[in-house]
Image (cartoon, rainbow, N blue to C red):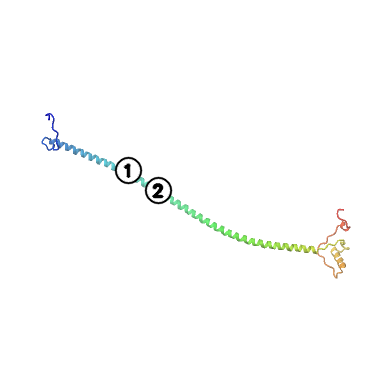
């Protein structure tokens, strides 16, 4: 080995009599200072992180509390509005139910009236038909009782035509009493008396 090259220190170089104790003490002091500075920096960083986290957590809690309060208020408002609307709908349903019941009752009454009117109409129709038949029968009978006399004088002096015809019938039919004539005796026109048709 050359003379100018120093030998490398081995693992036990600190224990060798060639190491300077003052240098070793300085090295240890510097190491402790560095470690202390690192620990202090670590504590400072952790403190800042804790402060930031706590501030963020406080802000988040406040926002959550504010949102929860707003949400609770909205829920109460919606519940109150729902209760009001439900109450109004219940009142309207009650009113509609009452009206429907009244309409059903009125409809039943009208139906009963219609049935009664139909029965009356049928009865009246039957009566009208019967009265019509009676009227036709009476008219037919009245026509059969009519008697038309042609060529008979309207009267004899001051005697009325009915009495003159009654006297004539009594004589012609040899009746014991003078018949009583009921009805209208129409006078013949001059042309009919002469035996000539009208318009000639």
In the image: residue 112, left or right of residue 77? right
- Residue carrying label 2: 71
- Secondary structure of the residue carrying numbered label 1: helix
In the image: residue 142, left or right of residue 101? right
Given residues 31 and 49, the one toward you in this image is 31
In the image: residue 142, left or right of residue 104? right
Q: Residue at x 45, y 52 (%)?
A: 82
Given residues 25 and 122, the one toward you in this image is 122
- Residue carrying label 1: 56
- Secondary structure of the residue carrying numbered label 2: helix
Total count of labels = 2
Residue 182, relative to residue 34: is it above or below? Answer: below
Percent position of residue 115, x then y? 62, 61
Instruction: Examine the image and state in which quarter residue 44 appears.
Output: top left
Q: Local crowd at mark 1 within 10 Å, few (<14), some, or many (≥20)?
A: few
Residue contact between numbered discs 1 and 2, judged by CB atoms under 8 Å: no
Given residues 127 and 59, the one toward you in this image is 127
Percent position of residue 126, x then y? 69, 62
Instruction: Examine the image and state in which quarter residue 47 appears.
Output: top left
In the image: residue 80, left or right of residue 190? left
What's the distance in space between the residues labelled 1 and 2, CA to CA?
22 Å
Q: Local crowd at mark 2 within 10 Å, few (<14), some, or many (≥20)?
A: few
């Amino acid at each position: 080995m050359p003379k100018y090259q120093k030998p490398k220190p081995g693992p036990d170089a600190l224990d060798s009599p060639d190491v300077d104790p003052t240098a070793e003490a300085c090295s240890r002091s510097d190491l402790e200072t560095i470690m202390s500075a690192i620990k202090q920096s670590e504590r400072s960083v952790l403190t800042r992180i804790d402060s930031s986290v706590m501030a963020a957590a406080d802000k988040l809690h406040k926002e959550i509390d504010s949102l929860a309060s707003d949400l609770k208020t909205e829920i109460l408002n919606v519940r109150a509005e729902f209760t009001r609307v439900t109450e109004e709908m219940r009142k309207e349903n009650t009113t509609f139910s009452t009206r429907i019941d009244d309409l059903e009752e009125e409809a039943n009454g009208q139906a009963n009236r219609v049935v009664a009117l139909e029965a009356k109409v049928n009865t009246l129709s039957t009566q009208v038909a019967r009265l019509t038949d009676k009227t036709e029968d009476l008219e037919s009978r009245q026509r059969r009782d009519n008697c038309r006399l042609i060529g008979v004088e309207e009267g004899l002096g001051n005697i009325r035509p009915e009495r003159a015809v009654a006297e004539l019938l009594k004589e012609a039919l040899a009746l014991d009493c003078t018949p009583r004539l009921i009805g209208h005796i129409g006078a013949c026109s001059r042309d009919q008396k002469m035996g000539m048709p009208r318009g000639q």
